[in-house]
Amino acid sequence: MFEDCKEEEEDEEWPLAIIKHDARHAMWMLCGTLGVDCRGVPGQACRLLERYLAVQMHNFSNLAPGTVVAQGPTFKRQLLRKLPVLMVSCIQLAAKMNSAYFQMNASFIRVCLIFKGVRLTVDEIKESEFRVYSTLGFRIPLWTSVEAGEALAVAAGMPQEMLEGVALLVNLAEYRRDRLNGRVWWASNLSPPSPNFARVGLRTVHLAAGSVAAAARQLSYCGPDPAPRLAELTRAPLCYVRCISNCLLTELLAGDAGSGVSSSRKRKRQD
C-alpha cells in the first residue's frame, strides 16, 4: 500500500494535478458502460490518467523553450483529442490490476463504446493501452483506494458488515477528490502538525484512512474510535486523519455529492 503511494510523491517540476469533476464524472460513467464501476476501479483509472498527463506535461516542458512556446497550443489540442481513448486505456489497466472477473479485451470495449457513439478500432485501443502502460513505467498500483480502505477498516477493528459502507465512502471521496483535496488543504493548514502532509496533496492511503474514520461516524460504529489506529497505520498525524474525515462528511452533506456514484460491489455482466 505504501509502495503504491510513492507514485504520488510531489514532483517539484511537474506535480500531479487532480482532474476536475466533469472529467471524473465522465470516467465513472465510462466505467459503468464497460461494467467495471466497482471495487475502486473508477478512482484508480482517474489516478492513472493524472499520472499519465503529468508525465506528458513534464516531458513537453523539458523541450527547448522556443518549441514549448510554439507547439504548446497544438500539444494541448492533441491531448484533448486523445482524451477518450486515454480514459479507456486507464480503465483497462485499472480493471486488469483489480483482477476483473471477465476478460476486458479490446473487441469487447470497442462494442461497448459504439453504443455510446464513440468509435475506436481494436488497434487504436490496443496501441493506446500499451502507450499509457509504458508511459507509466509499466507500474500500476496493486491496491485501489477502496481495497485500501477495507483493509484499514479491518486492521482498525471495524466489523465485516461495515465494509460495504466503508467502500461507498471511499468511492464518494474519490468521486469528489478534486473538491475534497481543496477542502483538506485549506482546513489542514489551520492545524500546525498537518501542513507538511497537505502540501503534497491528498494521497490515496490518507484518503482511504479518512474515509474509514468518516464511515465509523456515519454508520454509528460502537467500538473504540478507529482514528488513532488509522493514523498509526498510515503514519499520519491524528489531526490530519480527522481533518479528512470531517471534510468528507461535509461533502456528504452537500446534497448532490453522491450523484453518479455506484456501489463498490462487483456486478455481474449481463449477456
Image (spheres, rainbow, N blue to C red):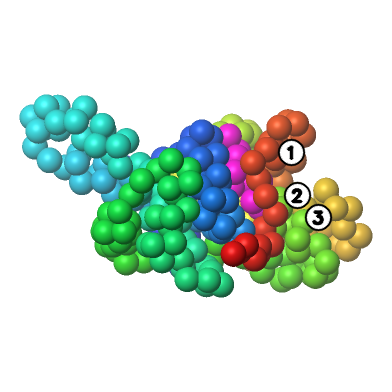
Q: Is residue 242 left or right of residue 38?
A: right
The answer to the question of whether label 1 and label 3 lie on touching residues, with beta carbons closer than 8 A, is no
Q: Which residue is denoted by mark 3 in the rendering?
A: 216
Say which amino acid is labelled 3.
Ala
**For the residues marked 1 and 3, what is the alpha-carbon distance in whole angstroms?**
14 Å
SS category of the residue bearing label 3? helix
**For the residues marked 3 and 2, what is the alpha-carbon distance in whole angstroms?**
5 Å
Q: Is residue 97 above or below residue 194?
A: below
- Mark linked to residue 163: none
Say which amino acid is labelled 1.
Leu
Quadrant of the rendering where the C terminus is positioned: bottom right
* Image location (x, y in percent) of residue 143: 53, 66
Residue drawn at the location 66% of the way across and 69% of the way down: 151
- Residue 211 seen in the current view: no
* Image location (x, y in percent) of residue 8: 43, 54
Let me know if residue 175 is in the magenta part.
yes
Let me know if residue 137 is in the magenta part.
no
Q: Residues within 10 Å of mark 2 (few under 14, many from 20)?
A: many
Q: Nearer the viewer, residue 131 or 111?
A: 111
Q: Is residue 15 left or right of residue 161?
A: left
- Mark linked to residue 214: 2
Predominant SS along the magenta part: helix
Q: Is residue 213 above or below residue 76?
A: below
Specify the segment rendered in magenta. Answer: 170-180
The answer to the question of whether label 1 and label 2 lie on touching residues, with beta carbons closer than 8 A, is yes
Say which amino acid is labelled 2.
Ala
Q: Which residue is denoted by mark 1 in the rendering?
A: 252
Q: Residues within 10 Å of mark 3 (few under 14, many from 20)?
A: many
The answer to the question of whether label 3 and label 2 lie on touching residues, with beta carbons closer than 8 A, is yes
- Residue 265 seen in the current view: yes
**For the residues marked 1 and 2, what is the alpha-carbon distance in whole angstroms?**
10 Å
Q: Nearer the viewer, residue 118 or 68?
A: 118
